[in-house]
Amino acid sequence: MAEKIKCLIIGSGPAGYTAAIYAARADMKPVMYTGMQMGGQLTTTTEVDNFPGYPNGTDGTAMMNDLQKQAERFGTEVRFGMVTKVEFSKEEGGIHKVLVDGATEIEAETVIISTGATAKYLGLESEQRLIGGGVSACATCDGFFYKGQDVVVVGAGDTAAEEATYLANICNKVTMLVRKDYMRASKAMQHRVNKTENIEVLYNTEIDEVIGDNVVDGVRAVNNQTGDKKEIPVTGVFIAIGHKPNTDIFKGILDMDETGYLITEGKSTKTNLPGVFAAGDVQDKEYRQAVTAAGTGCMAALDAERYLGALE
């Protein structure tokens, strides 16, 4: 027999936990399945300094633990598990069927999707080992910690150009490593990069290795045309080669853009199916901040509550 619930939340980052807090307070008795990475992307961030209410900062894991406790205090049931299949109803007031870990059947009146997005990395052993120790995928999250220092940005698109110009305002020097002999960024963004005095762009250049034991001491860069290698002493490495939204199981069911981000209606969190809502980085490729994710989590719970209220 499938378990019947009022509100199912898929994913456990700031969006999911905030949705849970609001849904629980509205007596929707939410059940959350955390996914494999409990707490989401923030648990890979050592320090969080830009979330309101933490005057001395906190770390990502501690903050997610705080949010989980708050959600549970109001009655959210947090379960460790992965949603492996969905069968969403197209009818107003229809029941949405979900399979967890290929075995547990759930029937939900509303579903809030907050599965987030995963930053793309280069896949080097040294890079993976130093995530949180100087390797980051978010300049607006972590750039502040490298004030007055030298950093590297890897990437050639608009995001990389934006991160480089953002970092140039606070760092001593920014070196951009671009794999090809041109940048993919828009002309406007390229002009901004070229006009910024403390940004140096190295074309046909890739990272061979991130240097450092516990923290980043530099990178060994390689010219992919000549094979020449050189070490660049830096304290921060920002990987800006894109994000992949965690939406594979919703393909062909929910509307999404060409990259896979879920499309929501206007300023709401409504997807194209009634009773299914999306919050956080899974539907936001613009801002990608913990605080904006939390805001849309709140919106999703309010949208779900109003949806159920309108059915009565």
Image (cartoon, rainbow, N blue to C red):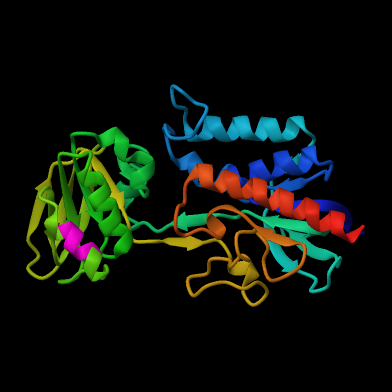
The boundaries of the magenta stretch are 189-193
Q: Is residue 50 left or right of residue 152?
A: right
- Residue at screen point 51% across, 58% down: 284
**Res 78 quadrant in image:** top right
Q: Is residue 303 left or right of residue 292?
A: right
Q: Is residue 34 visible?
A: no
Q: Residue at x 70, y 55 (%)?
A: 112
Quadrant of the frame with the N terminus? bottom right
Toward which corner of the image does residue 142 lie, by quadrant? top left
Residue 9 location (% of width, % of height): 71, 51
Residue 60 shown left or right of residue 77 in the figure: left
Q: Residue at x 86, y 65 (%)?
A: 93
Where does residue 267 sit, x and y in percent of width and height?
Answer: 60, 59
Residue at point 86%, 54% (across, down): 309
Q: Nearer the viewer, residue 166 or 72?
A: 166
Would residue 36 be counted in the magenta stretch? no
User: Which secondary structure class fits the magenta region best?
Assistant: helix
* Whole-percent x, y for residue 280 in the image: 57, 52
Q: Quadrant of residue 94?
A: bottom right
- Residue 88 in the image: above or below residue 21: below
Q: Is the residue 34 above or below the residue 275 in the image?
A: above
Nearest to the observer: residue 310 or residue 176: 310
Residue 243 in percent (x, y) is at 43, 60
